[in-house]
Amino acid sequence: MSKKKSICIGIPCYRDVPFEVLEDYMRFAFYLGRRYTEYDFFLAIKGKSEQFRARNAIVQAALVYDSDYILMLDDDHVIDINKTLGPDTSYEFLKVLIGHLEADSKKGIIGALYYQRGGKCEPVIMEEYNGQYFFKTHEEVTGGLQKVDVTGGGCMLIRKEVFDKIPSPWFEPEFEYGTDIQVCRKAKQVGFEIWCDTSIELGHIKTEREVITSKNIAKHVKETDEWLARSDIQKAKPVFSTLSDYETDARLFSGKSMYELEELAIMYKDSNFGNFDINNLEDYYRGLGVNQLARNVIFHSNPGIKKNDVAILSMFNHTNGVPIKGLDFCCGSAPVGFELARRGHYVDFVDVPGSYAEEFVKWRSEKHKISCGFQLTDNYDWILLLDAIEHLHPEKFSSVFVNLISRLKSGGSVITNYFYNYDLMNVEHINQNKELVKQEFIKNGVYPINPYRWVKDPVILTELVGV
């Protein structure tokens, strides 16, 4: 008689587990005993003062039991999201997951779908790009079997052979990556595939004892948006999260994954630049299409550039949530300027009319219900010139700059990264005379507070030149 296959169910557990979880998991255990008679089960519940230690302890227990599979469940999920009273077929999900692994030995980890408890309630399945991980969008959930880079650790079934091939400790402190990213990343490195059956959905308990499912996500997202709109907490909004929203929106607007956007960015050709009149390049920029957005997104996904974007955004913390008016000139896809608009500032976004990037910003403004403009007006408190000046013809820059500064209030700021841009290989960078640009700033009464921020202010002028 052949030995039954065995499954270790591991639950990293904090104190004060919600009663909904206790009830659901007890019913699940009863169901397993009655309906999964072809399997042996072992239980490993480990305290989770540190999650990585709890998960390592679960794996160690599973190996002692010689388990064929390890089912990781978190202590804040509900399997029976329909809240039935009797035996429920939702508890059959484990057989489905086992079936997927037994049908294909390349599949090392498979998960079920659940959603984050806050923010935009993203589905907890991820794709990797250059060592960074991005949540799939709601639109990318197929409702079936999906190959992913990471499936959420709150519900994942792992075949034993994964832990035969990756060295101990299998989980590490979460300094860079969460434990679910860690194990999926390591499993992929030794040749296994990661999947999620998004036809199987688990609920996720909020602190208010509300269960997040696909049926009520819209309500929770609306509550989050209303909370973020409050001026007293808006200034504390996590910037890296909102910059990730920029990447997610770019994927939705273009219909491309991060991999596809990277390919388009690599294929981006500026060799055609020389075929256009250098004094009138609008047709060139209009003709770039989706490649223009792809290049913007890949550039701003670089961790160093993200930190730079965060530093620029931090210059606006002094407003204490009070809206001020700004201009994002030569805005491109406007990752920084749009974040300021989301914080409640009124922003005019100005770039080449009809360009793909401008259309993207217009689409984002409608999606996020942002009040903004797309033409030059007056009385600006600040002007962004990010990745802009180097694209302006030197002979035209003076007249353009005079026009912009005439629209800036006294005491207003010009914020630019131009003086740190030394990309001389990009043929689109036709203005690299930094001394000439600096003198143009000063000639128009605009003086540096730091290399990024310049201020139009007679008081500053007096202090600097002794007038």
Image (cartoon, helix red, strand yellow):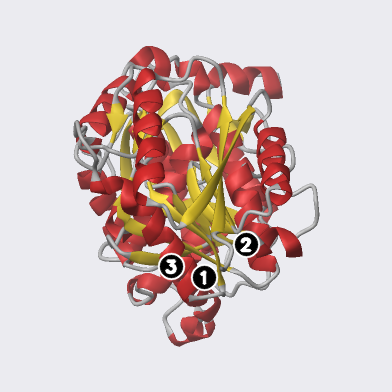
Cβ–Cβ under 8 Å for marks 1 and 3 = no
Residue under the point 58% across and 75% down: 427
- Camera-side residue of 249 and 353: 249
Asked if residue 326 can be seen in this view, the reply is: no
Q: Which residue is under mark 2?
A: 130
- Say left or right for 384 vs 286: right
Q: Badge 1 local density, few (<14 within 10 Å), some, or many (20+)?
A: many
Element type at marker 2?
loop
Q: Badge 3 local density, few (<14 within 10 Å), some, or many (20+)?
A: some
Residue 462 appears in which quarter of the rendering? Answer: top right
Residue under the point 45% across and 17% down: 319
- Camera-side residue of 126 and 419: 126
Of all residues, the one furthest to the right in this rendering is: 168
**176, above or below 228, in the image:** below
Task: Specify the amino acid type for callout 3.
Answer: His
Asked if residue 379 can be seen in this view, the reply is: yes
- Say left or right for 62 vs 103: right
